[in-house]
Image (tube, helix red, strand yellow):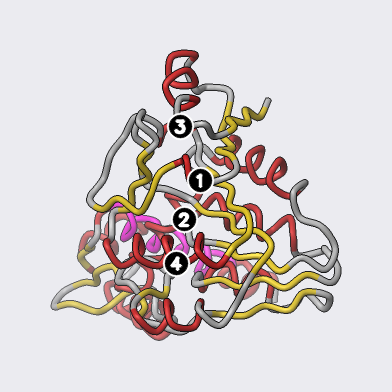
């Protein structure tokens, strides 16, 4: 009985290690895995079949490769971990601007996702979002009404975009919008990597009485594909302490408040 339990644990550990190897290498071969773990090729085939049934890998001739679903989850998880300490601090600051009975918009992005995690225990607020990730965080919060915009799912990211999302936004008037950015120029220009996201972000600001941009300092001074507006259109930029004095000086020319978390 004890031996059976140990074998089960060993098998689970092997599945976990194979998963990590596929994340790192994109593809693995049965023969190489059998040598690495000191087991038969038949055992590795069964392991890969198990992982394929779980949607974590796709079988290839002689091995397995990372599944598209897993590749997406890994990519999003990596982006979420980048500068996570500062994102959490920015989110904590932003949460102070949310009051009972508020109707708010939470944009897509990993910093707004951190804010969603803080809001899930709030009471009597309504959250409108184009983010599948934000909606999944809030869906079981009993005192929060969550409205997920319709639209087209953007490849490689859990976001809804397009004319449907924009049309649904026209139905609402909200107290405050919290938005991210893929880049913020020193002239205050706000950038997105996707023109469809840029268009949705413009519409969000039109439907909100106040807007706050949540961005860690690594995005400041960077540009991207599509401009969606300027800091002069919002109440404040909330960022972290690694922003430089020169960057603050330049951004203040937009007339917008710069809030630095510490």
Alpha-carbon distance for marks 4 and 2?
Answer: 28 Å
Secondary structure at numbered mark 4: helix
Q: Does residue 2 belong to the magenta stretch? A: no
- Kindly identify the residue that appears in the image at 58 percent across and 58 percent down: 113
| Relative image position of residue 260 (x, y in whole percent) | 62, 28
Q: CA distance from mark 4 to mark 1?
A: 28 Å
Q: Could you tell whether 62 is left or right of 1 in the image? A: left
Please determine whether, in this image, residue 4 is positioned above or below residue 194. Answer: below
Category of crowding for the residue at label 2, using alpha-carbon neighbours closer than 10 angstroms: few (below 14), some (14–19), many (at least 20): few
Residue 181 placed where, x, y %? 42, 48
Query: What's drawn in magenta, residue-wise?
Result: 9-24
User: Magenta stretch: residue 13 in it?
Assistant: yes
Quadrant location of the N terminus?
bottom right
Depth check: give the residue in front, 168 or 51.
168
Q: Residue at x 43, y 82 (%)?
A: 167
N-terminal of the pair, mark 3 or mark 1, is 1
Secondary structure of the residue carrying tag 1 is helix
Of the image marks 4 and 3, the number of the one nearer the N terminus: 4
In depth, the one of 218 and 258 nearer the eye is: 258
Residue highlighted by disc 1: 81
Q: CA distance from mark 4 to mark 3?
A: 21 Å
Residues at circles 1 and 2 in contact by the CB criterion of under 8 Å = yes
Q: Position of residue 94 (x, y in %)?
A: 68, 46
First of labels 4, 2 by sequence position: 2
Q: Give the mark toward the camera: 4 or 2.
A: 4
Residue designated by label 4: 203
Residue at 59% x, 62% y: name it.
208
- Asked whether the residues under the numbered discs 2 and 3 touch, taking CB atoms below 8 Å apart as contact, a structural biologist would say no
Residue at numbered disc 3: 254
The circle drawn on residue 46 is none
């Amino acid at each position: 009985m004890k031996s059976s339990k140990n074998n089960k644990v060993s098998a689970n550990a092997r599945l976990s290690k194979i998963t990590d190897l596929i994340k790192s290498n994109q593809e693995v071969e049965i023969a190489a895995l059998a040598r690495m773990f000191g087991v038969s090729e038949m055992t590795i085939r069964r392991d890969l079949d198990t992982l394929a049934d779980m949607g974590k890998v796709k079988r290839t001739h002689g091995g397995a490769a990372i599944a598209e679903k897993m590749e997406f989850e890994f990519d999003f998880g990596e982006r979420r971990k980048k500068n996570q300490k500062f994102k959490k601090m920015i989110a904590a600051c932003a949460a102070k601007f949310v009051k009972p009975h508020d109707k708010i918009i939470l944009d897509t992005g990993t910093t707004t996702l951190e804010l969603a995690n803080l809001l899930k225990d709030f009471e009597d607020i309504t959250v409108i979002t184009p983010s599948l990730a934000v909606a999944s965080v809030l869906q079981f919060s009993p005192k929060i009404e969550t409205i997920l915009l319709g639209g087209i799912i953007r490849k490689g990211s859990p976001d809804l975009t397009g004319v449907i999302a924009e049309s649904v936004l026209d139905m609402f008037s909200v107290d405050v919008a919290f938005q991210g950015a893929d880049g913020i120029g020193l002239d205050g220009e706000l950038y997105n990597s996707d023109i469809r996201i840029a268009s949705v972000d413009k519409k969000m600001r039109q439907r909100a009485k106040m807007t706050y941009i949540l961005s860690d300092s690594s995005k400041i001074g960077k540009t991207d594909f599509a401009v969606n507006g300027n800091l002069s259109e919002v109440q404040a930029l909330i960022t972290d302490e690694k922003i430089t004095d020169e960057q603050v000086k330049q951004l203040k020319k937009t007339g917008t408040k710069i809030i630095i978390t510490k």
